Image: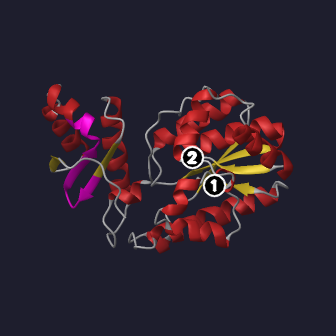
Amino acid sequence: MLSKSDPKYKQLIHYLTDLGDAAIAFSGGVDSTFLLNAAHEALGDKVLAMTVRTPYIPDWEIKEARDFTEKLGVKHVVVEIPVDDKILNNPENRCYLCKMILFKRLREIATGKGIKNLLDGTNHDDSADNRPGMKALKELNILSPLRDNGFTKENIRSYSRMNNLPTWEKPAYACLLTRIPYNTPVDNDLLRRIDKAEKFLIDLGIKAVRVRVHGNLARIETEPKLISKIFQENLFKTISEQLKEIGFKYVTLDLEGYRENK
């Protein structure tokens, strides 16, 4: 059974304590929630959580981030950033461009508040993935304590459960730009429709879900066990009617299930 005296966890706390202060890019996801909780334990009021609000981040994630920081008692700012012209057509290097844009802004705010260290929740497993955004983080000298201390995705969920964090079994999410094909114009109305469609499905209990968009067609990807739930509970008509009301003309269920789109 894990405990806070576990050597790996103690090593992370020592690492964070030695920093002296930290601004943390906080999405409210599994990794950044665990990192923020550990940083608060290590640094107390010398921690600032920074959450980006932009049209391609779901509104419900912003609310969850607010709720957690309020409960934890940590300082929190929500940073408004519009969709930059560089990613308006969803280019293939969008992740690199996005990270550069967002983290430069977060760095400016952290520096303005006298905070030296800007941290993100990249973990050890992310290093093996094809993640263009990591190149931007390296160029901007963003610290990734979970990666540097060898925390895998499985480790983070285990330690999150140990710390009674609400995210320990939360599905992984990605920004809404990943729901749109590369080199496709992005507008706020499309992003809003995707956000509403996914929130509706999450509220139905389809928690690990992506609504991929192809013109006026919405293609739902979810885990195989949740595909079974849709069949068993006969949710087809309910889902189709609601997504059409949101603004999609056609609604499909991808029978291969969720998979990461590069």
Task: Establish if 59 lies above or below 176.
Answer: above
Residue 215 sits in which quadrant? bottom left
Image point 72% across, 30% down: which residue? 4
Image quarter in which the C terminus is found: bottom left
Image quarter in which the N terminus is found: top right
Magenta residues, start to end = 212-227
Task: Establish if 125 lies above or below 97.
Answer: above
Other residues around mark 1 within 10 Å, as few (<14) / some (14–19) / many (≥20): some
Residue 162 sits in which quadrant? top right
Q: Secondary structure at mark 2?
A: loop
Would you say the residues marked 1 and 2 are in contact, meaning their CB atoms lie under 8 Å apart?
A: no
Q: Please state which of the two labelled residues, at mark 1 or mark 2, is closer to the viewer.
A: 1
Image point 57% across, 46% down: which residue? 27
Is residue 158 something that shows in the picture?
yes
Q: Nearer the viewer, residue 39 or 216?
A: 39
Q: Pinpoint residue 219: horizontal percent, then vertical percent.
A: 22, 51
Q: Pinpoint residue 97: horizontal percent, then vertical percent.
A: 53, 71
Q: Secondary structure at mark 1?
A: helix
Q: Nearer the viewer, residue 73 or 39?
A: 39
Type of amino acid at the residue the image marks with label 2: Ser
Q: Nearer the viewer, residue 248 or 123?
A: 123
- Distance from disc 1 to disc 2, alpha carbons, whole Å, reads 17 Å
The reply, left or right, for residue 183 in relation to residue 254 is right
Q: Pinpoint residue 15: horizontal percent, then vertical percent.
A: 79, 49
Image point 25% across, 40% down: which residue? 224
Other residues around mark 2 within 10 Å, as few (<14) / some (14–19) / many (≥20): many
Is residue 20 something that shows in the picture?
no
Residue under pointer 2: 27
Residue 42 sits in which quadrant? top right
Residue under pointer 1: 147
Type of amino acid at the residue the image marks with label 1: Arg
Q: Earlier in the sequence, mark 1 or mark 2?
A: 2
